[in-house]
Structure formats: structure tokens, C-alpha cells
Image (cartoon, rainbow, N blue to C red):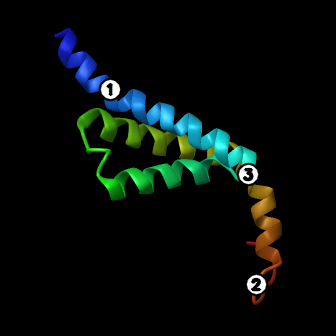
Amino acid sequence: MEQALLTALAPVVLLLALGVVAAIVTRMVGLSAIVGYLAIGIVLAATGLAKSTEPIRLLAELGVVLLLFDIGLHFSLSHLRERALACPGKSGPY
């Protein structure tokens, strides 16, 4: 059982470590950490180093949920309304 747990956690730990490295590098360059995460994901998928296993798939879905939650926290309906009024062809409030 311990061997199965270690086998399942090894890719997760590898991806987390690479994510931390990607975040640090992209912050040093002046970019968002999301850019680094996407770049690491593309490189790992292209090289075939990240096999799609159940723990990886679960973490990917959890990451999408957390990203959408973070976007929702920073979403401002009043700011969206201001931007919508500035759009060409849009007249008046909603």
C-alpha cells in the first residue's frame, strides 16, 4: 500500500516542484505565474513526461476550479458595466 501511495504521489510532487520553479522564473522575468504554469504544461505534454494519471487529472480539475474562483473574487460587475458602456454601438444601460 505504501508503494502504491508513493507511486501515485511522485508525479504530483514533480509537477508541484516544476510549478514553483516556473512561477519563480516568470516572476523574475516580470510575467504572471500563470504564464510559467502554462509553459511547463506545454513542455511536459509535448515531451510526454507528464502521463495523464488519475491524480494528475484530479489536480488539473481542482486547479481549474480554483482559477475560476480566483477570477470570480476579482470580478467587478460595476467595472464590467462601465466597460460595456464604452463599447461602440452600445447605448444606454443594460
- Give the residue at mark 2: 90
Marked residue nearer the N-terminal end (1 or 2): 1
Q: Is residue 93 visible?
A: no
- Give the residue at mark 1: 10
Q: Nearer the viewer, mark 1 or mark 2?
A: 1
Q: In whole angstroms, how far apart are the C-alphas of marks 3 and 2? A: 39 Å
Q: Nearer the viewer, mark 3 or mark 2?
A: 3
Name the residue nearer the viewer: 35 or 22: 22
- Give the residue at mark 3: 29
Q: Is residue 24 visible?
A: yes
**The residue tagged with tag 2: helix, strand or loop?**
loop
**The residue tagged with tag 1: helix, strand or loop?**
helix
- Expressed as whole percent of the image width and height from the top left, the position of residue 1 reads 16, 10
Q: Label 1 crowding class (10 Å Cα cut-off): few <14, some 14-19, many 20+?
A: few
**The residue tagged with tag 3: helix, strand or loop?**
helix
Q: Amino acid at mark 3?
A: Val
Q: In whole angstroms, how far apart are the C-alphas of marks 3 and 1? A: 29 Å
Name the residue nearer the viewer: 45 or 54: 45
Q: In whole angstroms, how far apart are the C-alphas of marks 1 and 2? A: 53 Å
Compared to residue 76, the image places residue 16 above or below, namely above
Q: Label 2 crowding class (10 Å Cα cut-off): few <14, some 14-19, many 20+?
A: few
Marked residue nearer the N-terminal end (3 or 2): 3
Q: Are marks 3 and 1 in contact (CB under 8 Å)?
A: no
Task: Identify which residue is drawn at 62% across, 41% down.
Answer: 23
- The quadrant of the rendering that contains the C terminus is bottom right
Residue 28 located left or right of residue 41: right
Residue 89 located left or right of residue 38: right
Task: Identify which residue is drawn at 33% across, 55% down.
Answer: 47
- Expressed as whole percent of the image width and height from the top left, the position of residue 19 reads 52, 38
Task: Identify which residue is drawn at 48% across, 49% down.
Answer: 40
Task: Identify which residue is drawn at 78% across, 87% down.
Answer: 88
Compared to residue 51, the image places residue 7 above or below, namely above
